[in-house]
Amino acid sequence: MSSERITYGPVEGLRAGRYGLGLDMKVTCYRIGGTLIDTGPPNQWRAVRRFVTQQDDEHGIDRVILTHHHEDHAGNAARLQELLDVPVYAPEKSLDRLREGISLETYRWIVWGRPRPVEAEPVPESLTLADGTPLHTLSAPGHSDDMVCYLAPAHELLFAADLYVTRRPEYLRFDEHAPRLIESIHQVLEHDFDAVLCAHRGVVEDGRRALADKVKYMEALCGVVRRRYRYDKLSVPEITDEILGTEGMLYWATGGDFSKHNLIASCLQEVEADASAIVE
Ligand SMILES: [Zn+2]
């Protein structure tokens, strides 16, 4: 188990996590001024505690804001609230799941640990950072229905949570929604920023380009999948095999929670539809 520190302009980050199940499952939480964005997975608590209590400038952490309810982001929010006696803010849609907890697939508590429930407050649309500049909340569903990104326009930075992760995704979790993710990336790209602070990749300096590349790739993928499905009458497993090949390590390591099949099936979902029924 190891963790590493990141410094990028006014931002400090802690990248912590395990190499679980043969996969790099590291997650980064970021600090800008006294604001901590995300809190790392529960089993990284010792590294997170060191990160928030060994700051050598005069400002400590005075608030915690979360991007979504997943345990690798919200996992230490309860402990931080208790340790630092600071408010925890989260997207409105995350609040119930943070308070009541969610059931985790086995691989998730093996890799990240189990989070404690936390009572969070709804994050405002805009906050003021310690240097007097704003931090805006941008709704960005798709990876999860509650996810938001945080934009620091004065620093041209986007705290992207799990919006980016990779330029060419090959897998999707069962509860992710590809067309909604595409829509969110387009909406986020309407704002001014340069670098992306990704929860899994760390600092992506050409982040705007990387996100634009990702959305282009995903749109092309959705286009091909829809054509093959609607006009050529291929099934989802046939299209998956044709475009992405057989399932790999991530599928087996996560008990099928992440799969190529999910990605292809999700390309056929509609943005308007509330029910996210996956096509067999
Ligand atoms: Zn997530």
Image (tube, rainbow, N blue to C red):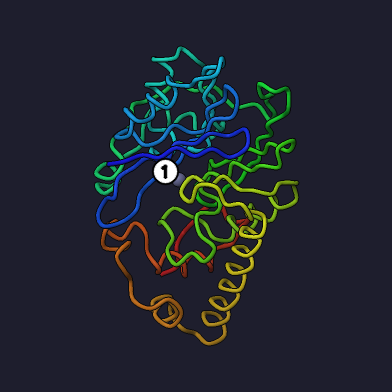
Residue 171: give x, y in percent of width and height.
42, 64
Question: For the point 44% across and 14% down, which residue is it?
Answer: 84
From the image, tell me which residue sits under label 1. Answer: 27
Q: Secondary structure at mark 1?
A: strand
Q: Residues within 10 Å of mark 1 (few under 14, many from 20)?
A: many
Please say if 219 is above or below 234: above
> Which image quarter holds the C terminus?
bottom left
Q: Confirm or reject: label 1 Cβ below 8 Å from ligand 1.
A: no
- From the viewer's perspective, tell me whether residue 195 is left or right of residue 175: right
Write the residue at 55% across / 47% down: 203
Say which quarter of the image contains residue 91.
top right
Residue 257 lies in quadrant: bottom left
Say whether residue 105 is left or right of residue 77: left
Above or below, 23 against 87 in this view is below
Q: Quadrant of residue 220?
A: bottom right
Q: Is residue 85 above or below residue 217?
A: above
Residue drawn at (54%, 60%) of the image: 178
- The percent position of residue 46, horizontal first and vertical second, equals 31, 27
Quadrant for ligand 1 reads top left
Residue shown at the point (75%, 46%) measured from the top left = 192
Position in image of residue 29 (x %, y %): 47, 36
- Residue 219 % position (x, y): 62, 69
How many tags in the picture?
1
Quadrant in which the N terminus is drawn: top left
